Amino acid sequence: MVESLQNASSIKSLDSNPSINAHVSRIMEGEPVNVNEFQELARQALPKMYYDYYSGGAEDQYTLKENVEAFHRITFRPRILVDVSRINLSTTVLGYKISAPVMVAPSAMHKLAHPEGEIATARAAAASNTIMVLSSMSSCTIEEVASSCNAIRFFQLYVYKNRDVAAQLVQRAERNGYKAIVLTVDAPMLGRREADIKNKMIVPPLKNIEGLVSTEVDNDIGWLRSITNLPILIKGVLTREDAIKATEVGVAGIVVSNHGARQLDYTPATITVLEEVVHAVGGKVPVFLDGGVRRGTDVFKALALGAQAVLIGRPVVYGLAAKGEYGVRKVIHMLKDELELTMALSGCPSVKDITRSHVRTEHEKIHSLL
């Protein structure tokens, strides 16, 4: 009888909690309850060719799997006796305040996922008070995205052998209020994506890049700095050596990235080399991470290992394919909610309170056993 009363009391307390009620309602209605569930919705919504294009990686897809699974091997060292009644997720990126350390990564051709394409993505990022990095391979123009909403956004660039092409893109980005250039340096040629080969996927804009992209990164950055006052971030760094070179040529930030595992297979998962890059730059420039982020816990782990923020690519596209602008907003919101909970349960009232001592890596676990 006592147990029955306790159960009834427990149910009553759940009923009086609006957030729990909303969570239960979403489950009953089939609404996604985490970012991973959006991937299945996207698979159902898209033609197989387009889903495979977005979801696939290079060759054996070892790195594609590792980008996600490497996060699973990092565990927490939570702190107690900390006042976490108020959690502040906000941070700054190049001086711009955003609501949480989660940004939208550059990814190509959003109109394959949804008719509104990057305009829907941009509006979702703006509504979430975060930064979107527009891909130079976007389906919508620089101008269309800029006029769609008022927000801080960056522009991703490949440097072409014909520098007039790059110069024109940079000038258009500047004129339309983009606040930084993100230079992708890991794609002098396209990786071998076998799902696209099987599907006979033809992507003319991407194919046109081959043979046009410059491989002289040092010179490219110097040249870019000579034609624009916008800060330049370099995306595609995975080693200490390249991180040092990047700081020496004057970049404003580094994105640790393996191009979503779409270029060279068997490169390391980005989270496993983040700390190497962070130590190499020694605080001279901010370091960001993309690749494999699917949970708020992943965001926390990246911050603990030295990232200033993360960028999300596939989750955004999956949200867009499943539910348009609302889906992208929902994906970002889910990650923020999960990050907030992780911070509270780890004893971190703000992102500044997240430290290296809050996580334990696989290497540390093995070392402790020796």
Image: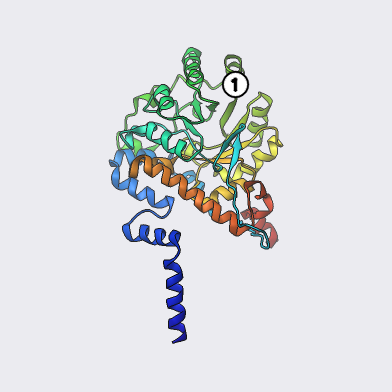
Residue at left offset 39%, top offset 62%? 24
Residue at left offset 62%, top offset 37%? 287
- Number of callouts: 1
Element at label 1: helix
Q: Percent x, y for residue 336?
A: 51, 48
Tell me the quarter of the image containing the C terminus.
bottom right
Tell me the quarter of the image containing the N terminus.
bottom left
Q: Is residue 66 left or right of residue 120?
A: right
Residue in the foreground of this view, choosing between 271 and 20: 20
Q: Badge 1 local density, few (<14 within 10 Å), some, or many (20+)?
A: some
Q: Percent x, y for residue 153?
A: 50, 30
Q: Amino acid at mark 1?
A: Ile
Q: Percent x, y for residue 82?
A: 67, 59
- Dividing the picture into quadrants, the one containing residue 254 is top right
| 188 vs 335: above or below | above
Res. 73 visible in picture: no
Q: Is residue 58 left or right of residue 98?
A: left
Residue at left offset 49%, top offset 27%? 156
Which residue carries the number 1 mark?
Answer: 221
Res. 129 visible in picture: yes
Residue in the foreground of this view, choosing between 218 and 264: 218
